[in-house]
Image (spheres, helix red, strand yellow):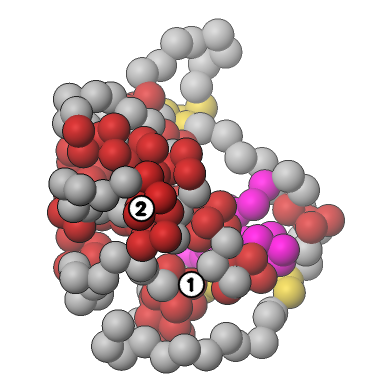
Amino acid sequence: MKGIENSMPAIRVSNQGKRKVMSESFLTTARSWYEIEHKAWEFRTAIGATGEKFLPVMDILEIIMSQSLMLVELRIETVQDMGTAEGFTAPDGSFIAFREDVYKKAHRNDPRARFTVAHEIGHFVLHSNTVLSRVPFGAVVPPYKLTEPQANVFAASLLAPLQLIESYDTVSDLENNFGISHTCAVNRLNRRNNLSKKDSGC
């Protein structure tokens, strides 16, 4: 990709606040999966990556979004601070944090870690400075009104957009060409083959 360096800056570990980061879904503006897929394609268009199947998500977040454009601060947190949460995006979009082991795996192009990075970019694009509210206890809420399913769909669409999936592609092709997991590849093929299917990303 033009303009993206192939360097890996030193890891910056932040343990300020000694907080435990929780991962849960919040109520947000209802969005169709098609709308979210379009948002992901707009993001690829903005960074000039509409022709690339394998998207270097860590370079995009770390070098372009954080260092060059200064849109968001990237924080690397300890396992002790993050707990079971692999990533976290501040509701105001000021920072995105990753557990340090996830950060390292993402730089090694681990499919799950890459999806986590794309997922947090999804939160940044879709949910920064928006009204979020907790899901009432016991409430049954459709996934298109929840932050986590929305970010999952964005991540899947960002990593493996339908526009770049060929009619002859197999699950293995998607895994290798887009750097995604087996489950994600299966879901994207299902989405391509049945656009009316209400999948939930990967």
Q: Which of the labelled discs sits on residue 58, or is there none?
A: 1
Residue 78 location, quadrant: bottom right
Count the marks: how many? 2
> SS for tag 2?
helix
Which one is in front in this view, the residue at disc 1 or the one at disc 2?
Answer: 2
Q: Residue at x 18, y 68 (%)?
A: 50
Say which amino acid is labelled 1: Met
Q: CA distance from mark 1 to mark 2?
A: 19 Å
Q: Are marks 1 and 2 in contact (CB under 8 Å)?
A: no
Question: Residue 180 at x, y = what percent?
Answer: 45, 54
> SS for tag 1?
helix
Out of 110 and 32, give the one closest to the viewer. Answer: 110
Q: Residue at x 52, y 90 (%)?
A: 7
Q: Which residues are magenta?
A: 85-102
Image: 25 above or below 100: above
Quadrant position of the C terminus in the picture: top left
Q: Which of the labelled discs sits on residue 182, or is there none?
A: none
Residue 144 location, quadrant: top left
Few, some or many C-alpha atoms within 10 Å of disc 2 (few <14, some 14-19, many ≥20)?
A: many
Say which amino acid is labelled 2: Leu
Question: Residue 19 at x, y = what percent?
Answer: 76, 53
Q: Residue at x 29, y 65 (%)?
A: 53
Q: Residue at x 48, y 10 (%)?
A: 139
Few, some or many C-alpha atoms within 10 Å of disc 1 (few <14, some 14-19, many ≥20)?
A: many
Out of 68 and 28, give the one closest to the viewer. Answer: 68
On whether residue 10 falls in the magenta region, the answer is: no
Q: Which of the labelled discs sits on residue 174, or is there none?
A: 2
